[in-house]
Amino acid sequence: MLPQLATATFPSQIFWVVFGFFCVYGIMAFFAVPKLRKILDIRQLRIDTLLNVASKFNEKSEKIKKEAEDLLAKTKQDILKTEEELISELEQKNAEEKQKLSKGILENTNREMASLKISSEEVFKSVSSDLDELLDLALKKMGNQKP
């Protein structure tokens, strides 16, 4: 039979188990647990501090994000306003250029019309004088007159 199962040694085995248990319990309760508690408290304090810092950084990042979004919206509005102003300015310059071109075309047309009128009058006078000469010659020929 095994010595652990001998009933005569049960009281001494129980004594040593209880004695060992209380020794380990005492060591754990007075030395190990306080050190572990201290380590856990320090760790929790550090975690809380880091969470507070992270929370502050999160608030700052949200504030910066909002400012960036506001700045982006303002920039978009400024760009649209500038674009509208440029379009308006270009349309105005375009209208002015059209007006100048129309005026120039009208002046050129009037000048050319005057030139054509003068040229047509000269041609008409030339043709008229040539026609008068031709008629005179024709009348002389018809009347058998020598020129």
Image (cartoon, rainbow, N blue to C red):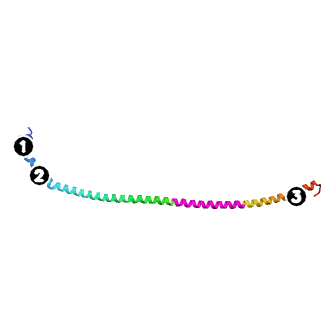
Measured Cα–Cα span from mark 1 to mark 2: 20 Å
**Quadrant housing the N terminus:** top left
The mark that comes first in sequence, 2 or 3, is 2
**How far from the left and from the top, in percent, is residue 91?**
57, 59
Binning the other alpha carbons within 10 Å of mark 3 as few (below 14), some (14 to 19) or many (20 upward) gives few
Dots 1 and 2: beta carbons under 8 Å? no
> x and y percent of residue 103 in the render?
66, 61
- The crowding category of the residue bearing disc 2, from other C-alpha atoms within 10 Å (few below 14, some 14 to 19, many at least 20), is few
Q: Quadrant of the C terminus?
A: bottom right
State the CA–CA distance, disc 1 to disc 3: 168 Å
The disc at residue 42 is none
Q: Residue at x 55, y 60 (%)?
A: 88
Q: Which mark is residue 133?
A: 3
**Which contiguous range is marked in magenta?**
83-111
Question: Spatial distance from mark 2 to mark 3, Cα to Cα?
Answer: 156 Å
In the picture as drawn, the residue positioned furthest to the left comes out as: 8
Callout 2 amino acid: Cys
Please name the residue shown 72% across and 61% down the image.
111
Q: Secondary structure at mark 1?
A: helix
- Name the secondary structure under disc 3: helix
Q: Which quadrant would residue 94 be assigned to in this image?
A: bottom right
Q: Amino acid at mark 1?
A: Phe
- Label drawn at residue 10: 1
